[in-house]
Image: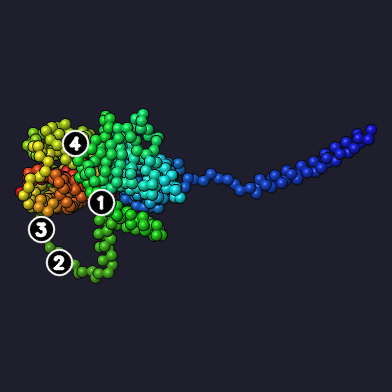
Amino acid sequence: MIQKPIKSGLYNALMTMLVVAMPLAGQSVAVAQESAPLTIETAQPAVGEVSLVLGKAWLISDSGRHAVAPGTEIRATDRILTEANGHVHIRFVDQALVSVRPDSRLEIVQYDYNADQPALSTIKLNLEEGITRSISGHGASSARDRFRLNTPIAAIGVRGTDFVVSATPRAVRALVNEGVIVMAPFSSDCSADSFGPCLVNAVELTGSSLQVIELEGSSTAPRLLPAVVERGPGMMEEEVQLAINDVQGNADDKNAGTGIYLESVTSQRVKDEAANVAPQPQPEPSRPEPPAPQLVDFTPQTAIAGTSLAERNLIWGRWSEGQAEQERITVAMADAQTGRDVTIPGGSDYLLFRDGNGGERVDRGLGPVSFDLASAQAFYHSDSGVAAMAVNGGSLDINFSNSQFNTSLQMSHSLTGDVNFAASGRLYDGGYFHTRSDTERLAGAVSLDGKEAGYFFEKQLENGGIQGLTLWDAQ
């Protein structure tokens, strides 16, 4: 009889306390919710930065498509797209350097660099199409089994390397300037989703082999071909210097050093500066202009017939028939390779074949030889399309005694004006010669008797680029 009032009293007291406490508790929760910091999902951290841009290029990311500029941050899953005159250099957080050449698409699939333990880094790039050059940083050098460059049909692994890859949906070619790469076709044993070099049907290429590695879509394994390319790491010396400048804090002018790539811009800049300090000369009395000399065009008006080319020791073969109507000094690959050996690749579309007659080395005792330009073709590639240029003249001198060569070409077109191409370098065993820079490239060969020569060349301009072929006869 005593417990019932006590229970009722406790119950009423507890209920009263809860009623009073509940509003306060509600207020405290509300205050806590209002004072709690707002959590926002942040973007992925930057894994690299654009250090140089020439021409037009685009960054495609989750936020859309934007023009690339020096200083643009690069993140995983971003894609770089360059137009016909575009050229982009990227410096990554592990000091890796990647150059994306014109008409190329490169995806940064994954870039997990572990600065504390570089061997645990994971890096994957995907060259969808075009040409790219990669100089390994601390991540790829320390975690070679966790680096991969995918292409449409092949996987490429590295062993601490500087290499160049050219990829189309049908074929992949690569050369090594320094180090080693391993190329293998995709298969059930080599998945695009995996990392590191594949082992099944894989072929290894070293930087000292003077070869290129190639895989065609119908092939079961890559093959090695002779190549003529410069193997020096100095090819990217300017880009390395740009990266060093950025690291040292020279970020105020992201275009510093760009002028070295643009001869015309640099020359104009020097002229403008000189005009600001030099006294202006008095104009001379006008004189009648002498008649302009008639320029010779060494590009044939019509394509050279296969029978005419067959009489030459050196013949250019072409892979594609897409622009066959513009070709002047080439024949179909099947016709060019009959009875001949391949010497050097001319970009991704041509190969230069030579009749060796069982020989592999140039005849001895040739000494200095000067060559006359026999025929040539050159095309200017720009945003507006492809235009055939006039090749107005040139010279080629090869000293077989000291293994040196020197050449020049003069070209013209209404879109470009007069354009000069000049190169010099070393003649290698087997009669191959070459030179390469960030804006110019040449690869050629001579006949073993020293009476003919031919080379592929390319030159990048401020807006667009030039590619061409030549054939020469000894004087």
Determine the secondary structure under disc 1: loop
The amino acid pointed to by label 3 is: Pro
Residue 176: give x, y in percent of width and height: 27, 45
Amino acid carrying mark 2 in the image: Pro
Residue at 41%, 50% (x, y): give it.
93
Give the CA separation, mark 4 to mark 1: 28 Å
Residue 330, quarter of the rendered image: top left
Q: Is residue 398 visible?
A: yes
Q: Is residue 456 left or right of residue 180?
A: left
Q: Nearer the viewer, mark 1 or mark 3?
A: 1
Q: Are marks 1 and 3 in contact (CB under 8 Å)?
A: no
Look at mark 3 in the image and give the residue it sits on: 290
Of residue 254 and residue 236, the one placed in the foreground of this image is 236
Give the alpha-carbon distance from disc 4 to disc 3, as whole Å: 43 Å
Q: Which residue is mark 1?
A: 232
Q: Which residue is mark 4?
A: 318
Q: Nearer the viewer, mark 4 or mark 1?
A: 1
Of callouts 1 and 3, which one flags the residue occurring earlier in the amino acid sequence? 1
- Can you tell which quarter of the image residue 75 is in? top left
Query: Alpha-carbon distance for marks 2 and 4?
Result: 54 Å
